[in-house]
Amino acid sequence: MSHNKTTSASISETNHAVQSLFNDYVVPTYGRFPLTIERGEGSQVWDVDGRRYLDMGGGIAVNALGHSHPELVETISNQAATLTHCCNLYYQPLQGQLARALVDRIGPGKCFFANSGAEANEGMFKLARKYGHEEGRYEILTCMQSFHGRTMACIAATGQEKVKQGFSPMMPGFRHVPFNNLEAMEKAISPSTVAIMIEGIQGEGGICSADSSYLRGLRSLCDKHRLLLLWDGVQCGHYRTGAFQSYSSILGDEKNGSSFLPDAISMAKSIGGGFPFGAFWVREPYQDILGPGTHGTTFGGNPLGCSVALKILEVIERDQLEQNVVEMGCLLANKLKALAERYPGLIQGIRGMGLMIGIVFNPEISALADDPRPVSLQMVERLHAHGMLTIPSGIQVVRFLPALNITSSEVKEALSILNDTLESIES
Ligand SMILES: Cc1ncc(COP(=O)(O)O)c(C=O)c1O
């Protein structure tokens, strides 16, 4: 690799050159950390300076099988050489196979394919509006602190003011109510309401899980008022909690959460393992509401994406990664709780499920007080300095969203890096 041959002076120049190209030519919508990642393998990545990092962020819950998984590399290259794109004017073998694989894992219904989480959610909004159209019902209730994406409808749906600022007027038809509060949800239902949408575990909102009684209550409310229950599984889905969708983990049901089903579920992130892909599933009897001409996207369900998504499902099942998520998640959570006890001045709590875990830091750590930035950002940066990637969430939470095939030695390495980082802050 080039970084092995370069001197440290030229290495820094490479890093600087990459970042200044971004600053000059890329619209600055992201606050980026000063890290330039060049390549990855499994749960490790290397920056342009040849420095290795343990990747516990998984590209924000995307890299389901880690980086450059050999079977995904092979699948992508074989499919690229066979049929890369085939527009949705025609049939192609893989899209139906993938839809069936998802239906098998959720319940009777059908799937629509898109390219991202926001698009998958947009599709669900259109489904809900079409469902309520004849009766003049259009309003979708969502939760405070939720996150549903960055398109105009998705920022209107998101229960966080910061994503809306500067983009008014908001698209009408969305209202937010406190999360995990059934009474507030019931009170908010109006004659215009057509759907309720939630994340099973709020990811951007700080790893906050819905309660089991809340889920059962929402299902009853939706049945009583003929509302669709829309489930945003973009971050918490695809085995991240140890079950295909997080409601099974939350409710502790047997496989597939057989006694509870939302009416539609959006998926993205891990479904493509790094290939941009999204989907929504819709249950019977609503599966044909969006008929020909009502919705579409050029790339949705393209053969390349479908081949990757099918291979990921095959590997997860074959390698029993569902079980790995449960075991590694328990190991991580238990050891993190022990660390929280060792550093009570730094860590306020550990929350989450499976491999979706948040460390809640004290927002006012005195050793970090000189820097005005939130503790979450400062901690993520300090972890970078110790060789680990994690994801900030809000002002005080740092997330672990690693690959589903993470090993116990990698989990132990993550804990040791975290311990070293905490020790360096406390001393
Ligand atoms: C719960 C949830 N929904 C939707 C989205 C939007 O997905 P995308 O960025 O692929 O559009 C995200 C992204 O972080 C998410 O976490």
Image (cartoon, rainbow, N blue to C red):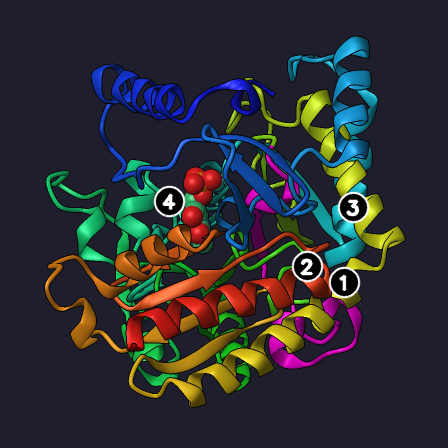
**Which part of the image, by quadrant, shows the N terminus?**
top right
Look at the image and say whether residue 172 sits in the magenta stretch.
no
Q: Provide the residue designation for mark 3.
A: 313
Q: Is residue 242 above or below residue 22?
A: below
**Which part of the image, by quadrant, shows the C terminus?**
bottom left
Which-is-in-front pick, marks 4 and 2? 2
- Pick the residue in front: 16 or 220: 16
Which-is-in-front pick, marks 3 and 4? 3
Q: Provide the residue designation for mark 4.
A: 149
- Pick the residue in front: 144 or 194: 144
The numbered dot on residue 239 is 2
Magenta-drawn segment:
247-274
User: Which residue is drawn at the image coordinates 28% and 68% (left, top)?
Assistant: 396
* Residue 236 in picture, x, y percent from top left: 55, 59
Left or right: 184 in relation to 318: left
Q: Provide the residue designation for mark 1.
A: 322
Crowd class of label 4 (few under 14; some 14 to 19; many from 20; radius 10 Å): many
Distance (Cα) linking label 4 and label 1: 26 Å
Q: Amino acid at mark 2?
A: Tyr
Distance (Cα) linking label 2 and label 3: 10 Å
Q: Is residue 153 above or below residue 349?
A: above
Please say whether residue 360 is visible from this viewpoint: yes
Secondary structure found at label 4? loop
Q: Amino acid at mark 4?
A: Gly
Q: Amino acid at mark 1?
A: Glu
User: Which residue is drawn at the image coordinates 42% and 72% (left, top)?
Assistant: 359
Left or right: 185 in relation to 117: left
Distance (Cα) linking label 4 and label 2: 21 Å
